[in-house]
Image: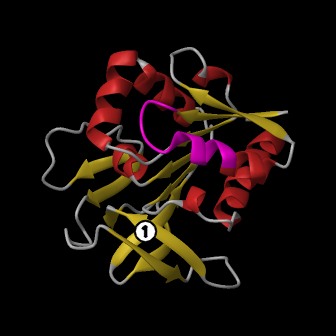
């Protein structure tokens, strides 16, 4: 049975738990992670949206930041959405309050879509998908630079809004707020590939 942990320090945790449970279809369990010691026992992890400054501080003070980094370095798949995308990056434009985890070779623009676009939806042409994906963006960041090892999956204009590097899939939008589970299916396939490889 797969065990997926949703980092539950702040943000839309319950929506992520429910969406992942739907994707799993009884093939595993989803647990909200609020304290250290749980991450090492997880087969996959979700770092949800929310307020990146708050989540960053709580990750550091709880020692969960080190557990998260250790898990990703060991190849445990991580789905990072919205604020999660900001936190896994290597660099954040003009930002001093948030210390990114440095797990993904990306540079983030926190206000890439402008302050007037608090929320919007967009049909994305996603690499590997046979039809557009309707994405929900809420005060969304975007990836403004990627390193050589990062695979770009989708863009809105010039802004990169979905990317993957090794065991990390990072999304600027909220896949847990739609009934389209194709990104969750990719994530579960990442778990299966790791299990097959003996990771």
Residue 53: quadrant of the picture: top left
User: How many labels, in total?
Assistant: 1
Q: Residue at x 69, y 60 (%)?
A: 186
Left or right side of 15 for 2 = right
Which residue was labeled with disc 1? Answer: 161
Q: Is residue 168 left or right of residue 22?
A: left
Which residue is at 59% across, 48% downward? 15
Q: Quick one: quadrant of the N terminus?
A: top right
Instruction: Judge whether residue 12 is colored magenta.
Output: yes
Q: Is residue 171 left or right of residue 62?
A: right
In percent of width and height, residue 181 lies at 70, 63
**Disc 1, SS:** strand
Is residue 68 depicted above or below 135 in this figure? above
Viewer-nearest residue: 122 or 124 = 122
Where does residue 71 sit, x and y in percent of width and height? 56, 30
Q: Which span of residues is magenta-colored?
A: 8-18
Mark 1 crowd level (few <14, some 14–19, many ≥20, 10 Å Cα) = many
Find residue 103 and report its horizontal and vertical position in percent: 42, 42
Seen at 35% across and 84% down, the residue is: 157
């Amino acid at each position: 049975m797969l065990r997926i942990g949703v980092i539950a320090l702040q943000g839309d945790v319950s929506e992520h738990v429910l969406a992942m449970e739907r994707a799993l279809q009884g093939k595993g369990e989803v647990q909200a992670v609020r304290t250290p010691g749980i991450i090492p026992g997880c087969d996959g992890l979700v770092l949800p949206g929310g307020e990146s400054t708050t989540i960053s501080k709580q990750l550091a003070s709880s020692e969960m930041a080190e557990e998260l980094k250790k898990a990703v370095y060991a190849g445990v798949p991580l789905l990072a959405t919205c604020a999660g995308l900001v936190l896994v990056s290597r660099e954040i434009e003009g930002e001093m309050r948030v210390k990114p985890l440095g797990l993904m070779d990306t540079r983030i623009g926190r206000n890439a879509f402008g302050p007037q676009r608090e929320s919007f939806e967009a049909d994305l042409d996603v690499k590997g998908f046979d039809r557009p994906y309707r994405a929900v963006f809420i005060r969304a960041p975007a990836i403004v630079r990627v390193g050589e090892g990062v695979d770009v999956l989708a863009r809105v204009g010039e802004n990169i809004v979905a990317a993957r590097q090794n065991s990390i899939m990072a999304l600027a939008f909220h896949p847990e707020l739609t009934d389209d589970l194709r990104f969750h299916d990719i994530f579960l396939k990442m778990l299966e590939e790791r299990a097959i490889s003996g990771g």
